[in-house]
Image: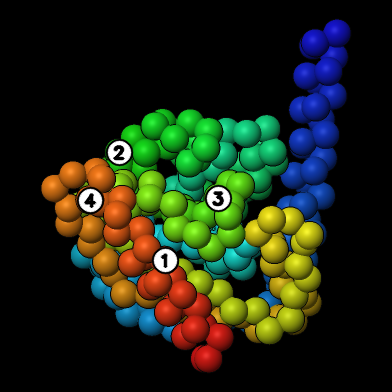
Amino acid sequence: MRSSQSSETSWKIRLSVLAGGNFLRVLSKTWRYRAVGDGPVKKLRKSKTPILFALWHGQMLPLLWYHRDQGVAIVVSEHSDGEIIARILVWMGYRLIRGSTSHGADRALLGIVRTLKNGDDVAITPDGPRGPARKFAPGAVVAANRAGAPIIPALAHVDRFWTLSSWDGFVIPKPFARITIAYGPPTRIEAPTTREAAAQAPRLEQLMSDAQEVACAS
């Protein structure tokens, strides 16, 4: 019985990934992107300095499509709901770090630090996987402090979109949407203790808010 249920679940996941991937491939061909404030990103990558990108959970789709196939690792929840997302991310060219602030937090933190120290970029949603929306959980700043890597906020403004009735107001750009990606300044977290590093989360939340204003105004 368990084997049959597992096989059925696996097929449902595969079909969901196939359908979602095909839908995304067709839809995204109509999107038009522009980037604002990406000079520091290019400079850090040229110097092979790993970056910890911070993005809000509800803006994942336009941001992750823009950064696809760049070798970025992303934190994905170990919750069962994260499996379909994980497979789509692999299809988009991302590497996975499993865990979240509520499930597998220690494993996720170690994975982020290890990946950054290996010289690879990481993306994290500091308000995921369950919210509250646009509240910066301290995990990202603790990881950046331990790895000695800069955090760069990455925000999106989409001029036409659908919004899912989910806790994060998940955004799906409509056909022919114009999308502006805005980056905040690279910010290094310098703190002698984990507690002091975590206390800087509100500062990063404000930088995310500032970058969102730039995206909306551009």
Question: Distance between the Cα atoms at labels 3 and 2?
Answer: 20 Å
Q: Mark 2 points at which residue?
A: 114
Q: Residue tagged by mark 1?
A: 205
In the picture, the disc for residue 128 is 3
Q: Which amino acid does label 1 sit on?
A: Glu
**Which of the pair 143/40 is nearer the observer?**
143
> Relative to 208, is 200 on the left or the right?
left
Q: Position of residue 175 (x, y in %)?
A: 78, 77
Please provide percent x and percent y for residue 134. Answer: 54, 63
User: Which amino acid, mark 4?
Assistant: Glu
**Element assignment for label 2:** helix
- Is residue 41 positioned above or below 86 on the image? below
Q: From the viewer's perspective, is residue 15 above or below residue 53?
A: above
Asked whether 28 or 164 is in front, the reply is 164
* Structural distance between the alpha carbons of marks 1 and 3: 14 Å
Q: Please, what is the three-letter code of the amino acid marked with disc 2?
A: Arg
Q: Which residue is drawn at 62% across and 34% down?
A: 79
* Nearer the camera: disc 2 or disc 4: 4
Say whether residue 54 is left or right of residue 19.
left
CB atoms of marks 3 and 2 within 8 Å:
no
- In depth, the one of 56 and 50 nearer the eye is 56
Q: Residues within 10 Å of mark 1 (few under 14, many from 20)?
A: some
